[in-house]
């Protein structure tokens, strides 16, 4: 086996081994140190001695022994019984996947979303602190402080599994990781990582329609990854993307998942968003988009998970269905929403609809205001270019 | 999310403070710094020298012209800043409120989101 194949194998097994140890011995920080040592030993030994028949069992045994050695030296004065009870090292590891166990711990309610994300990537994703720091553009020392603080908070909160995070918290963190990777072009690896972890959860909970929905949503969104920016890094809106370059195998997998989950009894926010993404993926051209279905799905989403962003998206679908004025009328209901009042998305969608309604002067002004309100450089460039287009019509009458 | 929390100061206001009040400002910054380092939210903070030490550089027709002093003459000027990376705008505002300058009339603490960031990642 090549060195990089061994590295992949180790990355796949590390969260499961850590999950197993944490479930047995609870002390998160010590378990992580022990697993790191076992992984290091494997990385050194396996290329020459060969990969053991049961790599995960090997890692669990070695990490378990390191952990117990550590505990014995740390707590020599502890009673003999404690040490004895720990001395039964599990040599035979059951075939369960403890990645989910670990994810539930990383998304502990005592942590802020930012810390949940960092710890999830570190412990379950197996990324190095330096890699996570680079992904979030903070110094490595800052990220190191954040991760150790997160571990300490879990420990202080009595963290094993008396109060595990609900599965919805894990899904939310995976969704946030995916979005980080999706919105920033240079962090596409975070999107891949989110998909990998969501797959692991899906393997554990194959009948949970929200898990399936989230995985499908990620796959369908990621299928457009190559086409949503130009080589120069400029954003390309959905209706101008080259659909022949969308990743067909990701779409096929996403569509299969959505259809299977929609046949089930429950309909949650992730599944609905996946169904919307699936409707876009189904359209061979932007003109063929089934806006009636998309609007209906947003309407249901708005009812089960009311959120001004959902209404904003429904306004776009409504405008496609009944004309820009209908969309603008719906947008007007959002003007009183504090959460959205200062948001560039409200300005840019309104600009878009004004443009479609044949009012380039108003659209120009709104695009300019939206460009000033965004904190994303790529989005700012895009909105500025739309503003310019409104000022100089391409086909003068 | 990254924010620059800029401290706009006015030397006349600072000079009018008692020694105790000045010491309290220093202590307040020290306590906030320790807290932000511990929480993993601080990226860097810097205090700037007096604007009399500034120089404005302009290049016209390929010729560099250096003018001593600040670009804008004003009673208030940027005295320093915190660059933080935190969960939300709300949290950034909360941090800003902990800066002692925020409690003094005539000084201002301004919070602005960062749009582009590069360099000094190993600091």
Image (tube, coloured by chain):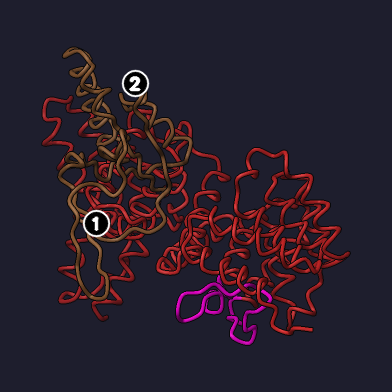
Where are the magenta residues, as a range?
A222-250
Who's brown, chain-wise?
Answer: B
Q: Is residue A318 above or below residue A342?
A: below
Q: Nearer the viewer, residue B77 or A327?
A: B77
* SS state under label 2: loop
Who's red, chain-wise?
Answer: A
Q: Is residue A246 above or below residue A146?
A: below
Q: Nearer the viewer, residue A26 or A62?
A: A26
| Numbered mark located on residue A195 in the image | none
| Numbered mark located on residue B121 in the image | 1
Quadrant in which residue B19 is drawn = top left
Lower position in the chain sequence, tag 2 or tag 1: 2
* Residue placed furthest toward the bottom: A244
Q: Position of residue A6 (x, y in %)?
A: 28, 73
For the question of whether residue B123 can be seen, the reply is: no
Quadrant in which residue B20 is drawn = top left
Question: Residue visible at 65% across and 43% down?
Answer: A341
């Amino acid at each position: 086996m090549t060195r990089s194949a061994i590295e992949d194998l180790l990355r796949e097994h590390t969260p499961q081994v850590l999950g197993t140890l944490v479930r047995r011995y609870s002390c998160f920080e010590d378990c992580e140190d022990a697993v790191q040592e076992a992984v290091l030993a494997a990385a050194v030994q396996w290329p020459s001695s060969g990969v053991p028949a049961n790599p995960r069992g090997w890692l669990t045994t070695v990490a378990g022994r390191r952990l117990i050695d550590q505990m014995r030296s740390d707590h020599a004065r502890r009673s003999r019984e404690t040490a004895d009870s720990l001395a039964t090292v599990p040599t035979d590891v059951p075939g369960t996947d403890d990645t989910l166990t670990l994810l539930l711990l990383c998304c502990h309610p005592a942590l802020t979303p930012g810390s949940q994300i960092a710890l999830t990537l570190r412990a379950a994703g197996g990324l190095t602190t330096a890699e996570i720091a680079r992904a979030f553009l903070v110094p490595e020392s800052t990220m190191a402080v954040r991760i150790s603080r997160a571990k300490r908070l879990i420990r202080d909160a009595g963290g094993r599994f008396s109060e595990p995070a609900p599965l919805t918290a894990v899904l939310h963190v995976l969704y946030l990781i995916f979005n980080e990777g999706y919105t920033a072009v240079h962090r596409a690896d975070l999107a891949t990582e989110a998909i990998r972890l969501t797959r692991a959860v899906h393997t554990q909970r194959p009948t949970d329609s929200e898990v399936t929905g989230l995985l499908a949503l990620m796959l369908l969104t990621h299928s457009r990854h190559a086409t949503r920016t130009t080589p120069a890094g400029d954003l390309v809106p959905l209706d101008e993307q080259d659909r022949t370059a969308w990743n067909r195998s990701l779409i096929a997998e996403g569509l299969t998942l959505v259809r299977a989950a929609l046949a089930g009894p429950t309909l949650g926010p992730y599944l609905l968003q996946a169904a919307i993404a699936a409707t876009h993926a189904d359209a061979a051209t932007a003109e063929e988009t089934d806006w009636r279905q998309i609007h209906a799905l947003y309407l249901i989403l708005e009812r089960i998970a009311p959120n001004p962003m959902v209404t904003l998206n429904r306004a776009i679908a409504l405008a496609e269905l009944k004309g820009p004025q209908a969309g603008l009328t719906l947008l007007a209901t959002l003007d009183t929403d504090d959460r959205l009042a200062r948001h560039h998305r409200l300005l840019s969608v309104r600009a878009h609809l004004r443009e479609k309604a044949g009012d380039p002067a108003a659209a120009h002004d709104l695009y300019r205001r939206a460009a000033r309100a965004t904190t994303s450089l790529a989005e700012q460039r895009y909105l500025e270019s739309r503003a310019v287009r409104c000022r100089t019509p391409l086909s003068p009458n | 999310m990254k924010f620059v929390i800029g401290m706009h100061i006015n030397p006349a206001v600072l000079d009018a403070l008692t020694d105790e009040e000045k010491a309290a400002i220093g202590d307040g910054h020290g306590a906030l710094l320790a807290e932000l380092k511990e929480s993993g939210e601080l990226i860097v903070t810097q205090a700037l020298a007096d604007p009399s030490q500034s120089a404005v550089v302009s290049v016209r027709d390929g010729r560099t012209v250096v003018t001593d002093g600040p670009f804008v003459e004003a009673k208030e000027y940027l005295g320093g800043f915190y660059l933080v990376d935190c969960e939300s705008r709300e949290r950034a505002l909360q941090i800003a409120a902990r800066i002692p300058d925020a409690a003094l009339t005539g000084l201002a603490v301004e919070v602005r989101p960062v749009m582009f960031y590069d360099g000094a990642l190993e600091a």
